[in-house]
Image (cartoon, rainbow, N blue to C red):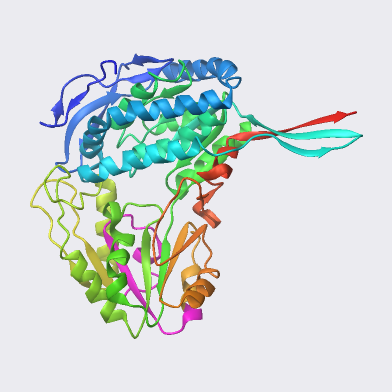
Amino acid sequence: MTETATISADDKTPAGSLTMTVDGHPVDAESRIEVINPSTAEVFTTVPDCSAEQFDQAVRGAEAAFAQWRRTPLEERQELLLKACEKIEANLDELARLLTLENGKPLANARGEIGAALGHWRAYAEIEFGDEVLRSDDERHIVLRRVPLGVVGAITAWNYPILLAAFKLGPALLAGNTVVLKPSPFTPVATLLFGRIVNEVFPPGVVQVLSGGDELGRWITAHPGIAKVSFTGSVPTGRAIMAASAPTLKRLTLELGGNDAGIVLPGTDIEKRADDLYWAGFSNCGQVCAGLKRLYVHESQIKEVAAALATVAATIKVGDGFDEGVQTGPIQNKPQFDRVRLLVDDAVDAGAEIVYQGDVPDDDGYFFPITIIGNAAEGSALVDEEPFGPVLPLITYSDIDDAITRANATDYGLGASVWGEDPDQTRRVAEQLEAGTVWINVHPSLLPTVPFGGRKQSGIGVEASRLGIEAYTDISVLHIKK
């Protein structure tokens, strides 16, 4: 690999200059953005703050590269994607350390995120897609062609920076598009290095990686040279992107927030399910779009579920992601930390009770205790909105049909889950839940060959699978009269 070292993760101090990648070259900016380590609440490095001129240059470069990239045979694009996987794998340790520094997740989890990204890319490279013959007879030969869109603007969130980048880059590139990628200003570091690495494989201009704040995002959604925006983030931002994209009729994939409900059916073996139930809600410090956000439990088992989850939670070590044995890190940023604290305080003031709250390090980082809330009810912000932190409200029900109605009574529709021992019963309940994905006895589980997307206001379009790749194409019909 060419020289890309930017930070010494061992001593957690800056050791160089992080740069953007434009037309295959490292590019700095006149101004820079501070990046905070959430485990210390201190600035540990800075990244370029992309200017309007640099953004325009990146789009022009991507447009120029598209002319050739779209004509590159699919087999060659697949081969280059797999070669990029090898480059990333060779630099996995460095990427994982940078990811832990900026995101806070345990180092093993950071390695797992990058490994999952590689797994998705390798699976995408095996997916068959392309032209389809609609009719062929003595009179006509009609072919439905899948053609690339052009330049894709990809905007990712801070909870899974590398995995979300892979979700967007892999399908877009395989479909023949070029990409301008913008990571969250909270977590741009590993993604900038990721961009430098993959640019050792792809032709210049095919993958552009820029860092910047909200203004850069607005430029992406408004620029006439961007044919599609693929965004992962909040519902309000997704609405703003949709509105800003309307004048140029951009294609959109929006993977937005979720307030995923889980329903524990009467007679569920709680001891057997406790560990999976816990991680469904508290994986990645609760910062998972499709994570379990509210759990409906039958009145006959509410105390048992609360006790079982508390037992698991008591074994979890919270701390700096570089410390040995840590299983849960901090909330990634101060605004989100403050929001979670406010949601919990408001719920308790409204009559909910804390049935478990864990310990956190006595440090300056954004460590929020693992919290299980009992006596929660609809109408409180903690239940009605997406908390996105290490907090899980337990909601009591007595009638299964009522639980289904209450679980569906939301504008969100990303994921949901049903927990129980009767396969027929769990399936009947699952089929009535209004979500893009409904899991049974697990939550969540994403596979590269399975489409993932939201219903209602949780998004537009899907990612992963053949459908996710085709979302980066337009249809062009070739109609030949014989």
Q: Tell me which residue sits at (54%, 42%) in the image.
A: 253
Residue 229 rendering spot, x and y as whole percentages: 52, 35
Residue 172 rendering spot, x and y as whole percentages: 52, 32
**261 or 348, nearer to the observer:** 261
Quadrant housing the N terminus:
top left
Q: Tell me which residue sits at (27%, 66%) in the image.
A: 275
Question: Residue 383: within the magenta?
Answer: yes
Extent of the magenta region: 375-402
Question: Residue 374: within the magenta?
Answer: no
Quadrant housing the C terminus:
top right
Q: In this view, does 436 lie above or below 122?
A: below
Residue 163 rendering spot, x and y as whole percentages: 38, 40
Residue 186 rendering spot, x and y as whole percentages: 30, 37
**124 or 208, nearer to the observer:** 124
Q: In this view, does 398 lie above or below 207?
A: below
Q: In this view, does 199 lie above or below 127?
A: above
